[in-house]
Image (cartoon, grey):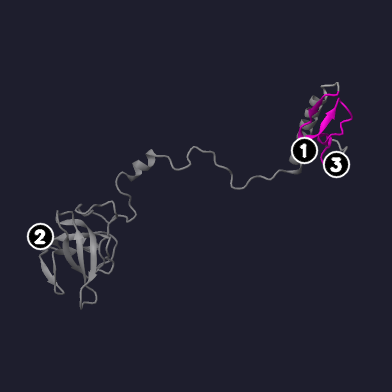
């Protein structure tokens, strides 16, 4: 394969040359290759398409050359050289991380946000964090006045039931009357704190 994906390991300006850059590119071989380019969008960490020595670009075979006084062992390709739709002439053809160094250049221009192969399957096999748990609403509904009255009546009925149960012992036996620590004396007048309704003494349930 003469047109391959390369990972730029190093990118340095060529001394005395305003636009030229010396690249060290991993193309999947035992050692990186050195290239010289004037493409402004090349930097370390990017994946580019490289035409190695022997490849044909525009009907011309790529050969080793010296550019700006620096040996170059191939050519950085742009979209026009590869026949891609989109991508400007003079800009390096970039590929996403799903392509490994040494892979054949894709026949069409890929999306740079393309996921590596198998990423979708792995994500589907593991549920996202928090899956299966009940999600609480962002805004809780405020209770209405009727809801508050009903809750107050339910609390009063519960207190009355506890007081009645405590006062049923007779013979002066004292039992806890529930809330407030009040005691009912042998079924007396019910003046314990627990008999106080909502809003003050002696007020019945609404």
Q: What secondary structure is found at the residue carrying circle 3?
A: loop
Kindly indicate whether the residue at mark 1 contacts the one at mark 3 (C-beta within 8 angstroms): no
195 vs 66, left or right, is: right
Badge 1 is on which residue? 152
Q: Residue 200 carries which label?
A: 3
Residue density around tag 3, few if under 14, some if 14–19, many if 20 or more, within 10 Å: few
Image location (x, y in percent) of residue 28: 18, 54
- Figure quadrant of the C terminus: top right
Q: What secondary structure is found at the residue carrying circle 2?
A: loop
- Image height of 55 relative to 150, above or below: below
80 vs 72, left or right, is: right
Image location (x, y in percent) of residue 132: 49, 37
For the record, the magenta segment spans 172-200
Kindly indicate whether the residue at mark 3 contacts the one at mark 2 (C-beta within 8 angstroms): no
Residue density around tag 1, few if under 14, some if 14–19, many if 20 or more, within 10 Å: some
- Please report the residue visible at 78 percent of the width from the left and 35 percent of the height from the top: 181
Badge 2 is on which residue? 54
190 vs 134, left or right, is: right
Mark 3 and mark 1: span between their CA atoms? 13 Å
Mark 2 and mark 3: span between their CA atoms? 98 Å
Specify the farthest residue to the right: 189
Q: Which of marks 1 and 2 is nearer the N terminus?
A: 2
Q: What secondary structure is found at the residue carrying circle 1?
A: helix
- Image height of 40 relative to 48, above or below: below
């Amino acid at each position: 394969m003469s047109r391959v994906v390369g990972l730029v390991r190093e990118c340095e300006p060529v001394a005395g040359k305003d636009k030229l850059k010396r690249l060290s590119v991993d193309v999947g071989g035992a050692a990186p290759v050195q290239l010289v380019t004037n493409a402004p969008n090349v930097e370390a960490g990017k994946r580019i398409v490289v035409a190695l020595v022997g490849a044909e670009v525009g009907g011309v075979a790529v050969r080793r050359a010296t550019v700006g006084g620096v040996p170059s062992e191939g050519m950085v390709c742009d979209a026009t050289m590869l026949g891609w739709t989109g991508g400007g002439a003079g800009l390096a053809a970039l590929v996403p991380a799903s392509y490994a160094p040494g892979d054949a250049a894709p026949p069409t221009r890929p999306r740079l946000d393309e996921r590596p192969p198998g990423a979708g399957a792995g994500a589907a096999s593991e549920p996202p964090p928090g899956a299966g748990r009940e999600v609480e609403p962002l805004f809780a509904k405020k209770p209405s006045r009727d809801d508050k009255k009903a809750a107050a009546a339910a609390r009063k009925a519960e207190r009355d039931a506890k007081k009645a149960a405590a006062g049923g012992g007779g013979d002066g036996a004292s039992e806890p009357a529930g809330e407030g620590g009040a005691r009912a004396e042998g079924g007396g007048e019910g003046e314990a704190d627990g008999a106080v309704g909502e809003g003050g003494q002696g007020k019945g349930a609404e």
